[in-house]
Amino acid sequence: MRTRVVFVITLVMALALLTGCGGSAFECEDEWGCAEIKSGQTVKVAYIGPTTGDYSSFGIDMSRGAELAVAYHPDVKGFPVELVIEDTQGSPEQGAAVANKLAADPRVVAIDGHTFSGSTEVAIPIYEDAKIVMMSPSATTPELTDLGSPVFNRVAFTDRQQGDAAAAYIYENLGIRKIALMHDGGAYGQGLAEMTGEFFEALGGTVVGKEAITPGETDYSAPLAAIAASEPELIYFGGYDADSAVLASQMGGAGLENAIFFGCDGTYGSQFLDLAGEAAEGAYSTFVPIPESGAFTKFREDYKSKYGDEQGELSPFSPHAHDALAVLLNALDQVAIESGDNLYIPRKALADAVRNTKDFEALTGTITCSDTGECAAASILFMIAQDGKWVPGPGQ
């Protein structure tokens, strides 16, 4: 009798070990494998962007959007969502380092990022090897989706769209016929400036000069002087707010006091206005208007309550960072599998669910992803700095 009891107890214990303490045994059949989240562990997602350095206003703002997305969607089938925030300082090198760090963590299942196109481009193959799906809120270089990566997606419009719209606005609305192009040499800034110039020339305008700058410097008098010799009516700059502010501040000293400074979505935000001061007056930038909705009203209220700043002051992208993570979390809900006390995330099924997102109601609009990962819902608006504030530019 004693032998039989011992046998029964041993059998029960063995079955418990095999089945996860009471559930059925789980076998991952996903082509890319499964992330295993054990009882008491969290589902790790990450926001990646510049939270320190010259471009920190973008990263801080977007990390807040990601935090609010988790606050609205705090768990996946009862397992808490943990948001990991990693700083790239805006550089591709640091972007690669962060991507490698996250790729080594088996519980990281999705990336809200990267923020800048250069950092994103170097990170894509790393996440692809690790089978981690990503959704960028702001990387706009068109070629990123041309890479054909099954893990990369974005909710931002592309630079091709922005450049086309900017050229048309400059030519048709502002009546400008001669522009000069300046950029920071990065994948985002240079590509955007060059595309804007191509679209402008196609409309009948003339690009009278082109100059690159070294980002992070405090004196751009030499490239501005070279541009001034061509007598442009407007300077179009592809790059970010800190460099934009230096350029705008030094245009007068270079003999360009009558030329318009026209920035991009990298210029928009309070930092440009603060750094450029009076020199910001009359400058333009690209803005991404968010349609009014009850959800966006709540987001703005929660943002102000939690962080003290008005949403949109630091950058225009906190709603995009929210939406990028909201899409990822929605896809996680669809594919996550409970077995016993554990949760399993099939990685290819997750990537497919993200790519197949359709009619998802988000802050930036209704999101539907293309088969290459283009998921943008927002439109483009051009802003002008007046009396220390950004307001919609004329003719829109």
Image (cartoon, helix red, strand yellow):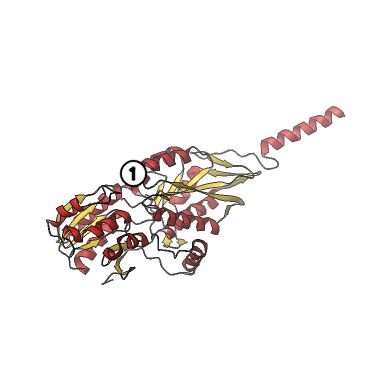
Instruction: Say which quadrant the N terminus sits in.
Output: top right
The residue at 38%/49% (across/down) is: 53
Q: Secondary structure at mark 1?
A: loop
> Which one is in front, 281 or 178?
281
With respect to residue 355, does 131 lie above or below?
A: above
Spot occupied by residue 365 in the image (x, y as percentages of width and height): 42, 63
Farthest-out residue, right: 1
Q: The disc labelled 1 sits on which kind of residue? A: Leu
Mark 1, residue position: 147
> Which one is in front, 388 or 141?
388
Spot occupied by residue 89 in the image (x, y as percentages of width and height): 39, 47
Q: Quadrant of residue 228?
A: bottom left
Q: Is residue 259 left or right of residue 53?
A: left
> Which one is in front, 382 or 339?
382
> Which one is in front, 96 or 53?
53
Spot occupied by residue 303 in the image (x, y as percentages of width and height): 49, 63
Instruction: Say which quadrant the C terminus sits in.
Output: bottom left
With respect to residue 6, does 340 lie above or below?
A: below
The residue at 34%/62% (across/down) is: 274
Crowd rating for badge 1 (residues with CA inside 10 Å; few <14, some 14–19, many 20+): few
With respect to residue 115, does 396 lie above or below?
A: below
Q: Quadrant of residue 276?
A: bottom left
